[in-house]
Image: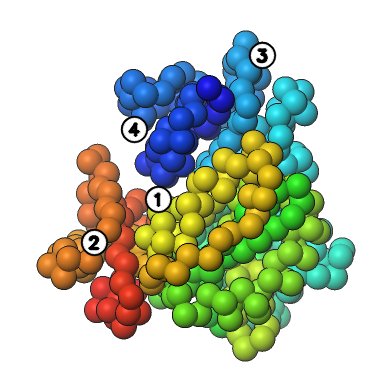
Amino acid sequence: MRKILVMGGSYMQSGFIETAINKGFNITILDRDSKCLYAGDQRIEFHEIDISDEVKVDAFLSDHSFDACIAPVSEVGNITLSKLAKKHKFYYNSEETISLTTNKLALRNKLKRQSSHSHQFFTYNEVKENSETLPYPLIVKPAQSSASRGVSLVKSSNEFEPAIQYALNFCNKDELLIEKYAEGKQYSIETISYQGKHEIVAVVEENMSPAPYFIERSDIIDIEQQEGLKLLLSDYVIDLLNSLNIEVGPCHLEVKIDGNEIFLIEIASRSGLLRDRLIAAANIVDYNELIINAYLKNLNVVKIENNHNKQNALLNILIYEQDMEKYRLAKEQEKLVDEYFYKEKKLLNKEIKLTDAYGYFFVSSANRSDFKVLTLV
């Protein structure tokens, strides 16, 4: 039986873990939380190890062998594995590639040198003395952060310093990124790569909370728009992934599209938030199976067979008390296909951050119009 090491045992990784178990793989999970979702699961082997601790993970890998080591969603696990892949001889993206896809400032600097995929940006040290002359509106955000932590829209110099102070809750001043605000509709692009070949799996419409803070509220796969969006984005995405030397596995890109112009917000060399479950709800493909096959070097994994039973799919992220109205309505309409709630969390009445989500639910329908009354905004 082939063995796979998975970095992290939380709900975010659960879709991948369940797919791997169902496919007959022997699964080992590392997580520092002895009470995480899979800690007591008899179907897997669990080790209480902090996946950010490179020394401990290195020692563990020295004593165990695996056919593949994978961090499907975990940014921290992704970084650790990239540092250890060469020593332990497992198939992975390079440390440099992972660094570029986790540090937005390093990414922007590389793209600027290549004169591609980059728009105007600044560091804090470049603008701290002349914020009055900046080309507002701007986005201020930590260079190494995800889930909208520390991100805010700044419309004038009066808002600049408060935005800086908000971002500094998540980073230091050397890690601040200030960039021109891009107009357009926001999408995420989910890809799969194998031996440096890339394919778009799905394009997801992202609905965010209003400015000044941007928190992901709902995500939609519109089946009728998929081919057109893929056609528009394909060359852009492949060129970007090649420029970052992406070799294997999933990537999650966030972009804004304004007409035929594409603006890169960020890229991560891992799967996006519950995109595996959203893609499954749309009946497009088993994204997790593609990921497993890619890391195991199975042939033809980049080829995605056309499924004629595809449906539109919606993911709602439950954060606030009023969000439950949409959940109850979806349940009444019998459109729910998946759901999950954190037992230890409570619904909020004010905006915090995406990681404070109370739960999630998924809906699928042949008619996109059914989502009009169910989508969170």
Q: Amino acid at mark 1?
A: Thr
Q: Which residue is mark 1?
A: 355
Q: Residue furthest left?
A: 332
Please name the residue shown 46% across and 30% down the image.
24
The mark closer to the camera, 1 or 2, is: 2
Q: Amino acid at mark 3?
A: Ser
User: Mark 2 and mark 1 in contact (Cβ < 8 Å)?
Assistant: no
Q: Could you tell whether 227 is left or right of 22 in the image?
A: right
Q: Which residue is mark 2?
A: 336
Camera sees residue 140: no
Other residues around mark 3 within 10 Å, as few (<14) / some (14–19) / many (≥20):
few
Q: Which numbered disc flags the more N-terminal residue, 1 or 4?
A: 4
Give the structural element (helix, strand or loop) at label 4.
loop
* Percent coordinates x, y for residue 156 in the rendering: 57, 80
Give the Cα separation between the discs numbered 1 and 4: 16 Å
Other residues around mark 4 within 10 Å, as few (<14) / some (14–19) / many (≥20):
some
Q: Which numbered disc flags the more N-terminal residue, 3 or 4?
A: 4
Give the Cα separation between the discs numbered 3 and 4: 26 Å
* Percent coordinates x, y for residue 317 in the rendering: 33, 60
Please name the residue shown 17% across and 65% down the image.
334
Q: Which residue is mark 3?
A: 62
Which quarter of the figure has residue 93? top right
Q: Amino acid at mark 4?
A: Leu
Give the Cα separation between the discs numbered 1 and 2: 23 Å
Q: Could you tell whether 218 is left or right of 370 in the image?
A: right
Q: Which numbered disc flags the more N-terminal residue, 2 or 4?
A: 4
The mark closer to the camera, 2 or 3, is: 2
Give the structural element (helix, strand or loop) at label 3.
helix
> How many numbered circles does the render carry?
4
Q: Residue furthest top?
A: 63
User: Mark 4 and mark 3 in contact (Cβ < 8 Å)?
Assistant: no
